[in-house]
Image (spheres, rainbow, N blue to C red):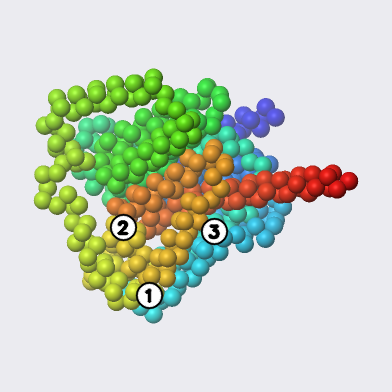
Amino acid sequence: MIIKLAINKSLKILYPLLLIGFLYLDNKVSVVLAGITLISIVCINYKKPEFLISGFYGAFIMTIVVNQNFIGIYTLISMLFCIFIYKFDIKKVFNKFNIIVFLFFVSSLLALHNVINFDFYSDGVLILLICLSISLSISLIPLKSLNINLIFSELNYYSFIFICLFFSTHYSIEELLNTPRALIYFNGNSEVGIRSNTISGFLIIFSLFNIGYLVNNKSKTKNWISIFSIILNLTALFFLQTRGAIVALAFIGGIILTKKIIKTKRINLKKITALSFLVVISLLFCIFNINYISEFRIFNTDNSDYSNGRFEIYKEALKYFNYHPIIGNGLYQFGPLKGSYTIEDPHNWVIYYLLSTGIVGTLLFCLTILTLLNGNRSIDRLNFIKYGALATIIHGLFEPTLSTSLPLLLFFITSSIYFHINNQQQNQENGVEHKNEKSTNLNVNI
């Protein structure tokens, strides 16, 4: 047991070091070893499906760092685990979330005849196929008796790795201050991979996981990792200056605060007083630094168009939507429709799916979101996973964080984990209640 624990700890230390090694050395051997390390962590802990579930985030981080699709490989490995290691139950895949996601995938195929650039379209279809596979794979994992504390512990681990990898290539505050926010890339200023808007969306999700760990974790010894991660995430958000991400974070914060007040049915005067004091201090700070803050992108309204041309993009995208309003023009066709040979996005997921999949696909995607949000509300400890998915939905109204490949993959990983854990545990609770009811009725009859 001690040897297994030591090996597990060693692998968890080795995994991020190998990814950092790739960022600095561009050594493919480091990537292969990182992948082997991730799978080894899952294999050593094969009796605990929490590691297989959280491993999706490890594969996602590898995909970001290397700019190669490790998510698809890991999803296949996850399915093999379910078939050969866990008790395989094909009936679990036939739930409403998987069915709606499958129908949404099928709807994306209807626009094949309208496609201009088939290469872009095939990339989009492949991403949706992987999203469907992720949901199917997670639904096959035995989720009825999961240790939710352990899940958040692992999510906290990968969240910490993500922000550490970001600052490993942006360790100079001066460099971040002097680099235009639009040119801040995850892997450094290489102009390859994800940049500011997308990074901000990921930071919000991982920050919510950190908070979820603080809420669910009874031990105080590991809380410093969460707190440190949150501080680093907020620091990175300050430099990235993404308005949509700030709006999403404020929206989720409002939901959490409102639910807390409704649940307790009382207002803690001490906390309100402390919060009011912080607000007053913040306002005084803003007043005395108004000249600097007015130049900060989040608050700068001196520009003639605060939306950065978003409304013009929306108008143009809706014009192309009118070409094929029922089934759409095909995935990733906004650029080709404009005469560009690049993948472009209208920075609003509703308009993007109307343009790409038409009314049919957009309604199905909205139904996917409604299915997620209307899941079981009794498992409050999982809410911070749902909040991560909800933050992506809000952020996606302003930035391409619910339409382009990597953000969409992260959304489906997060939403699938939340829905399927809720679904299986709810079915288990209903089954127990049904048995107890039958037993009670039998005793009454006797």
**Relative height, residue 106 to residue 281 (above, below):** below
Left or right, 343 with reference to 137:
left
- Badge 3: few (under 14), some or many (20 or more) residues near its Cα, within 10 Å? many
Q: Residue at x 40, y 40 (%)?
A: 255
Kindly identify which numbered label has been placed on residue 78: none
Q: Disc 3 marks which amino acid? A: Phe
Left or right, 388 with reference to 3:
left
Q: Residue at x 56, y 24 (%)?
A: 219
Q: Residue at x 27, y 44 (%)?
A: 242
Kindly identify which numbered label has been placed on residue 97: 3
Q: Disc 2 marks which amino acid? A: Asn
- Residue 135 % position (x, y): 54, 56
Pointer 2 residue? 348
Disc 2 element: loop
Left or right, 273 with reference to 175:
right
Is mark 1 in CB contact (under 8 Å) with mark 3? no
Is mark 1 in CB contact (under 8 Å) with mark 2? no
Q: Disc 1 marks which amino acid? A: Ile
Q: Earlier in the sequence, mark 1 or mark 2?
A: 1
Q: Is residue 211 visible?
A: no
Q: Earlier in the sequence, mark 1 or mark 3?
A: 3
C-alpha separation, residue under disc 1 versus residue under disc 2 = 19 Å
Pointer 1 residue? 326
- Residue 323 % position (x, y): 29, 76
Can you tell which quarter of the image residue 140 is in?
A: bottom right
| Residue nearer the viewer, 199 or 32 | 199
- Residue 222 % position (x, y): 51, 25
